[in-house]
């Protein structure tokens, strides 16, 4: 029986579709799963600086879990990863020469491999990691050494070894006396002598809870220090 032109055209289209799906279907599904898991559940991050020394070292790899902080506010002492101050600090935004990138653009820029292209980078798309020291309603005093007094009580901070020294040539530490607004937290790096944190952001230094991406729950690299971050 002779097939007509319409039947042959349909078969050709079907073959093309099956071929395309066999080739790109698994790749597309993998990418969608990656973005879905990364956005809603957890993602891997690395430590780019020494601001969390000695507990977290440069190039440590961490799992950042995102589910728990969707249901509750962050707690004092938790290590959190959050959007760059360049994306929410009003004074830093006012200094920009271009408009803020969209969330989609930031997701693209920070995608593995693409994130290594310097020309595509934007500081507003970066992520920071610090420790929550105070939450909304807390009265906080930070002395010139970098030690903290919370609601009138000096905090025991065994994770801090590098306090500020008056003998240092460039001493960035200074005294702060403030009350944290509701819906915000105050974050510090464990390396008090070398951390760009809530003490220095130009618009006031409070981190909006909604800018927190998740909390650091597990260090998976290097293997020699595998486990929960302190």
Image (cartoon, rainbow, N blue to C red):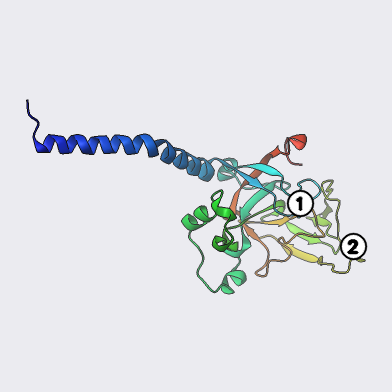
Measured from the top left, where is residue 163 in percent x and y? Answer: 86, 57
Q: Is residue 152 left or right of residue 104?
A: right
**Can I make out residue 152 in this image?**
no
Q: Crowding near pointer 2: few (<14 within 10 Å), some, many (20+)?
A: some
Above or below residue 132? Residue 145 is: below
* Element carrying mark 2: loop
Question: Which residue shows up at 77% across the image and 35% down it?
Answer: 224
Query: Circle 1 sits on which residue?
Result: 52
Question: Which sits in the foreground, 189 or 10?
Answer: 10
Measured in 3D between alpha carbons, the distance from the residue under mark 2 to the one under mark 1, in whole angstroms, is 17 Å
Q: Is residue 142 left or right of residue 62?
A: right
Tell me, for residue 106, which label it has, or none: none
In which image quadrant can residue 180 be found? bottom right
Question: Which residue shows up at 84% across the image and 67% down it?
Answer: 171
Q: Residue furthest top?
A: 1
Query: Circle 2 sits on which residue?
Result: 165
């Amino acid at each position: 029986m002779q097939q007509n032109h319409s039947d042959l055209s349909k078969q050709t289209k079907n073959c093309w579709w099956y071929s395309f799906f066999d080739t790109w279907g698994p790749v597309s599904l993998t990418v969608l799963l990656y973005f879905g898991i990364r956005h809603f559940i957890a993602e891997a991050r690395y430590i780019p600086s020494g601001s969390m020394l000695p507990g977290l070292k440069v190039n440590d790899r961490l799992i950042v879990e995102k589910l728990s902080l969707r249901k509750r506010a962050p707690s004092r002492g938790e290590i959190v990863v959050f959007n760059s101050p360049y994306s929410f600090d009003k004074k830093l935004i006012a200094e920009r020469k271009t408009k803020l990138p969209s969330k989609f653009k930031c997701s693209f820029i920070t995608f593995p491999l693409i994130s290594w292209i310097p020309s595509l980078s934007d500081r507003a798309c970066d992520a920071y990691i610090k420790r929550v020291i105070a939450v909304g309603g807390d009265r906080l005093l930070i002395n010139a050494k970098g030690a903290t007094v919370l609601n009138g009580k000096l905090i025991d901070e065994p994770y801090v070894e590098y306090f500020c020294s008056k003998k240092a040539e460039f001493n960035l530490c200074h005294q702060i006396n403030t009350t944290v607004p509701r819906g915000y937290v105050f974050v510090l790096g464990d390396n008090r002598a070398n951390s760009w944190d809530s003490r220095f952001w130009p618009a006031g230094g409070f981190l909006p809870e909604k800018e927190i991406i998740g909390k650091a729950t597990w260090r998976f690299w290097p293997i020699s220090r595998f486990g929960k971050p302190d």
